[in-house]
Image (cartoon, rainbow, N blue to C red):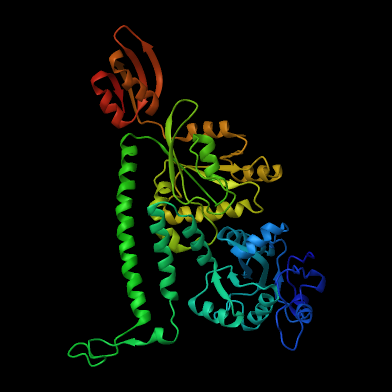
Amino acid sequence: MTSLPHEFDSELDRRSVLDESAIEIDPTFPPETPDLEDETYEEDQLDLVERYALRRVAGLSTELTDITEVEYRRLRLERVVLVGVWTEGTVEDAENSLRELAALAETAGSQVLEGVIQRRDRPDPATYIGSGKAGELRDIVRATGADTVICDGELSPAQLIHLEDVVKVKVIDRTALILDIFAQHARSREGKAQVALAQMEYMLPRLRGWGESLSRQAGGRAGSNGGVGLRGPGETKIETDRRRIRQRMAKLRREIAEMKKARETKRQQRRRNEVPSVAIAGYTNAGKSSLLNRLTGAGALVENALFATLDPTVRRAETPGGRVFTLADTVGFVRHLPHQLVEAFRSTLEEVAGADLILHVVDGSHPDPEAQLATVREVFAEIGAQGIPEIVVINKADVADPLVIDRLRRREPHSVAVSARTGRGVDELLAAIERDLPRPSIEVEVLVPYAKGGLVSRVYDHGQVLEREDTLEGVRLRARVTRFLAGELEPYTLSRVE
């Protein structure tokens, strides 16, 4: 496609920003030429004068050339057109947001045919892009043969209904798309319950009925005259649906609360042993699971897709100096992460809020890694994790631009560049983790009999040995240990310093 200027000006506001040579529609899509009555398909494609405010974004098509793949995808995948409203920032920011939406659509199982952006001060309250541009979007949908429109923002119920009425195909927004991906990828019982709760919270204000679905249900055996206390308008079908959804949401909240107790019990066991906890957090598809596998050999699912893993994975790890800690992989974040998901996954995100140290993973090969860092830190603030010590892990250093890595390291002094795929920089990361892990608070000097060798081993695992001497009576240690371990060493204590 032709390159376009990065800013709209007054001249562009009066004419098309897309010339005829920029039209690249695969002749195989749609399979049959649409019937446009008096106007031909070619004339429809060339008539772009009135589409001056819809800017196409290059590089969004996901059509395949292999015949087998194309036939398979035609049977399986929805064909979608993406539309975004550019209200602030640069055009690069708007295009990056739409490209991320394209990646989300592919992850959900869609084939992206076209992507357009409109410049507006704010989204139209009725149709998101305005009634005139909605009609132009309908023309693009007809020309490409798409069956779904995905909007890069959260639409109100009225906007969804009005835009669907114009384009005549299914319309969903960014929030519904992310919820759909979560529903596909949730594996554990808790994950499925959390996703179901988030979907119902999103669905509740968007329920609508057609025809008889809105009719009143009369009470009693005698219809609307059912006797004392049963007369009146009754309850509509949509009201019944809302009531049932609220009841189901209340049940899910109770189930998630029970699952939270089990998770909290495990967390308290680790706290009682005062094992330091490290949480891996960051933008989706930044390589968090790959890093967990590299550090612990956990065998977590690794896939080049957004939100490939949702359920947290906690594994035991060890620093080069022998200090034991737990490493937790958490759900990834994304810009405009739906509030329903933050609330539903709050028990899972507590792994981040309750950690002693956060490994904030960022994709060094991403076009805008600084935006990823800002987005994740917004979620940190929302869950109360902004005050926890943080190491920025610049992942994918083997394929990232060295200038970008240098820029990030200047911006984030407490950072490490690694490649989870090749292992580059992992030793430096482990050394940084060992340096930043909280130190045991109590210094003791003990003489442990040789028969209590297991206790000596625990001092090495959960404490910091400063001096060791093997004597005839046992092992003499000077070490810094946790309060819990200091209590077990009390019978063998020679001196103790708080």
In the picture, the quarter occupied by the N terminus is bottom right
Would you say residue 385 is visible in this rendering? yes
State the residue lying farthest toward the top. Answer: 472
Q: Which residue is found at the position 34% from the left and 20% from the top?
A: 456
Residue in the foreground of this view, choosing between 93 and 363? 363
Looking at the picture, how far across and down is residue 467, in whole percent?
Answer: 40, 17
**452 to the left or right of 83:** left
Compared to residue 448, the image places residue 85 above or below, namely: below
Which of these two is toward me, 129 or 102?
A: 102
Q: Is residue 132 above or below residue 332?
A: below
Q: Quadrant of the C terminus?
A: top left
Q: Residue furthest bottom?
A: 225
Residue at the spot 77% in from the left edge and 83% down from the top edge: 40
Left or right, 268 with respect to 289, comes to left
Q: Residue at x 54, y 40 (%)?
A: 291
Give coordinates of residue 356: x percent, y percent.
Answer: 42, 40
Residue located farthest toward the left when viewing the structure as drawn: 228
Total labels: the figure holds 0
Quarter where residue 221 is shown = bottom left
The relative height of residue 407 versus residue 49 in the rendered view (above or below) is above
Residue 161 in percent (x, y) is at 52, 80
In terms of depth relative to the viewer, which is nearer, 248 or 109?
109
Residue at the outermost right position: 21
Report if residue 77 is visible in the image: no
Residue 229 figure quarter: bottom left
Query: In the image, what residue occupies the spot 40% across and 86% down?
Result: 212
Residue 76 shown left or right of residue 246 in the figure: right
Q: Is residue 423 left or right of residue 267?
A: right
Residue 482, given in percent of the width and then of the height, sits at 33, 30
